Image: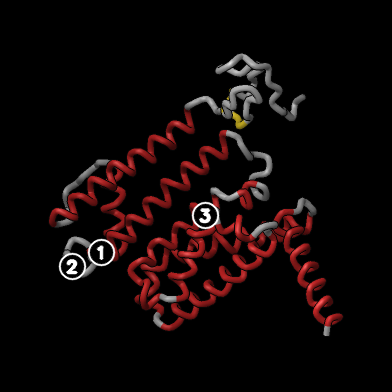
Amino acid sequence: MKAQGQEHTHTGWRLRARLRALYHGSSPTAVRFRLGVIVVDFAIIAFFIAAPLLKNQSGLIFYLIDYGIAAILAFDLIARASAYTDWKDWLKRPIVWVDLFVLATLLFPAWLYNLGFLRVLRLWTLLNSDFFWKTVGRGYNDTRVQDIVKALAALVTFVFVVAGFVYTSFMGRYEGISGYVDALYFTITSLTTTGYGDIILPGTWGRLLSIAVMLGGVGLFFRLIQSLNVPHKVYFPCPTCGLQRHDPDAVHCKACGETICIPDEGR
């Protein structure tokens, strides 16, 4: 019995080592594996975005796909946790909790149906993860491209989350929102402060939501513009004062004057 228990322990360690090599390694096999995972992730996110349009037409097939995606996400989360050195430390990451919440909406659609629009947050977690940037964006990690992609991901996620909330909250209760496209249209016109006036959410809560969309959307839009125009800063903590952002060609820290040596491929 003892020998059998030790064998199971060794098998578990080998499996964890294999998963760690796949999720965090740099071998061609590991890179191909992570690329496959990312492609599946984008396909799942596309389904989440299209879900409000598909649900009423697909019926049972929609729920079967829902539970199939839940199984994939559950397996992926278990594998990521197993590949992490300390799973307790892994659970402390906010991105992990967002993914766990997305999984809960898939496993319990009857109870969490009204929160299903938050599944689009998976786009934000993916494009803000080290997993993505160490695989697809290896040459763009900590560059202007990374800042732009993250800002764009935040804006796109905001648009679809708000559109889903408007659709869930006002569909069937207000004649101006007769479908998901109307909710998306209202979100974009409010975000851009165009305000054609053909769709106006009723009541105090409708006005407060419109204000939140305008303020939040404009803020994210300006963040995107800023990432496109403001000179990029690289992450390199100063050993003396701790300033973390510097110009890519900086030789001295602007805060304390300490000499710094920022790694550069050209050096």
The image shows residue 77 at horizontal and vertical percentages of 59, 65
Q: Residue furthest left?
A: 203
Residue 153 in percent (x, y) is at 47, 47
Assign a secondary structure to mark 1. Answer: helix
Circles 2 and 1: CB distance less than 8 Å? Answer: yes
Is tag 3's residue or tag 2's residue first in the polypeptide sequence? 3
Secondary structure category for the residue under label 3: helix
| Residue 32 place in picture, x, y as percent | 73, 58
The colour scheme used to paint the residues is secondary structure
Q: Of the two numbered discs 1 and 3 on the same chain, state the one appearing first in sequence.
A: 3
Q: Label 2: state its secondary structure.
A: loop
In the image, what residue type sits under mark 3? Ile
Residue picked out by circle 2: 173
Q: Which mark is residue 95?
A: 3
Q: Residue at x 31, y 49 (%)?
A: 188
In this picture, is 154 found above or below 92? above
Which residue has dot 1 on it?
169
Badge 1 crowding class, 10 Å Cα cut-off, few under 14, some 14 to 19, many 20 or more, is some
Nearest to the eye among marks 3 and 2: give it: 3
Left or right of residue 117: residue 65: right
Q: Quadrant of the C terminus?
A: top right
Identity, as a three-letter code, of the amino acid under mark 1? Ser
Vertical order, 140 against 114 (above or below): above
Seen at 39% across and 81% down, the residue is: 59
- Residue depicted at x 38% and y 50%: 158
Q: From the image, which quarter does the N terminus lie in?
A: bottom right
Task: Rate crowding at label 3 as few (under 14), some (14 to 19) or many (20 or more) other CA atoms within 10 Å.
Answer: some
